[in-house]
Image: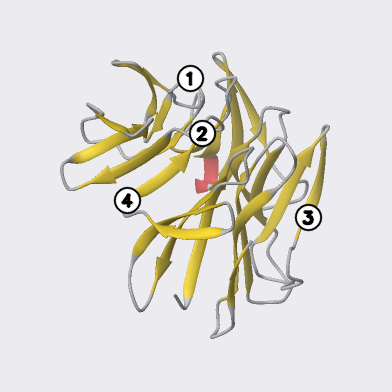
Amino acid sequence: ATIAYARGINNSGDIVGFATEPFESGFLYHDGNFNLFPGIVSISNNGMILATSASGPYIFSGGNSTPLNVSNEEVLAINNSGTVLVGGGFLTGSTFHPVSFPGATSISLRGINDLGEIVGSYTGAGNVSHGFLYDSGVYTTIDFPGAISSTAYAINNNGDIVGNYFVGGAPVGTQGFLYEDGSFQTFDAFNFFSDEATTVPTGINDYGEITGYQFESLGGGTKSL
């Protein structure tokens, strides 16, 4: 593949992602080997796989596939209890629970941990994007200090969050961040910190291993993290 995007990592170091050119397919990186896995979306710490197919989304576990009855919702992530994060909330068994940041005009859910904590972004006043954490009905904004916009992509069981932010001015690229122990730090894995660089950390496990992708938008290189 000429381009690959890593989307998430579990505590065993299994990585899921998506590759393009000369083919397009999801992949699972396991025990040092790449395996094509069309439609793979997420993998939990206990190895349950969330994926999609022509017949709809499903969970693959223990060699068995279980279809999901999710109508008109994009499937996004799965945790150890089998809770599935979807476009508008989360699914426990057959019960759908909506998630909607109070007062937001739109919302994008991104990640869920084994404690049921959810991260994502919402659009508020002025059409500005903010990161947020949802925990048992409580919403908390997660914004990189001084940023014009922020997005939270993933959270581990320690409460560490990865995402990205945009500050405007120079550099104009979108930078990654790690939020750990109540503090923010910029995350720039391959030193692409330039005017046209974009960094998107998309996953973090309990050992602090981070996945994602980084590229320079004006004809530069693309690397998976």
Colouring rule applied to residues: secondary structure
Mark 1 lies on residue = 81
Categorize mark 2 by other alpha carbons within 10 Å: few (<14), some (14-19), many (20+). Answer: many
Residue 74 as seen in the image, left or right of residue 192 = left
- Give the mark, 4 or 2, whose residue is nearer the N terminus: 4
**Secondary structure type for disc 2:** loop
* Alpha carbon distance from label 2 to label 1: 9 Å
- Look at the numbered disc 1 and give the secondary structure of its residue: loop
Q: Name the amino acid type tagged 4.
A: Gly
Indicate the secondary structure of the residue bearing disc 4: loop
Residue 220 vertical position relative to residue 222 in the rendered view, above or below: below
For the residues labelled 2 and 3, the Cα–Cα distance comes to: 26 Å
Q: Is residue 7 left or right of residue 95?
A: right
Q: Residues within 10 Å of mark 1 (few under 14, many from 20)?
A: some
Residue pointed to by mark 3: 186
Q: Distance between the residues labelled 1 and 3?
A: 32 Å
Q: Residue at x 67, y 70 (%)?
A: 172
The amino acid sitting under disc 2 is: Ser
Q: Pointer 2: what residue?
A: 44
Q: Are marks 2 and 1 in contact (CB under 8 Å)?
A: no
Residue 51: percent from left, percent from top: 34, 42
Examine the rendered structure and indicate whether residue 145 appears above or below residue 187. Answer: above
Q: Residues within 10 Å of mark 3 (few under 14, many from 20)?
A: some
Q: Name the residue under label 4.
A: 39
Q: In which quarter of the image is the N terminus?
A: bottom left
Spatial CA span between label 4 and label 1: 21 Å
Q: What residue type is labelled 3?
A: Thr
Which label lies toward us, 3 or 4? 4
Would residue 200 appear left or right of 49 to someone viewing this image?
right
Residue 105 visible to an observer of this rendering: no
Determine the residue positioned at 64% across, 37% down. Answer: 11
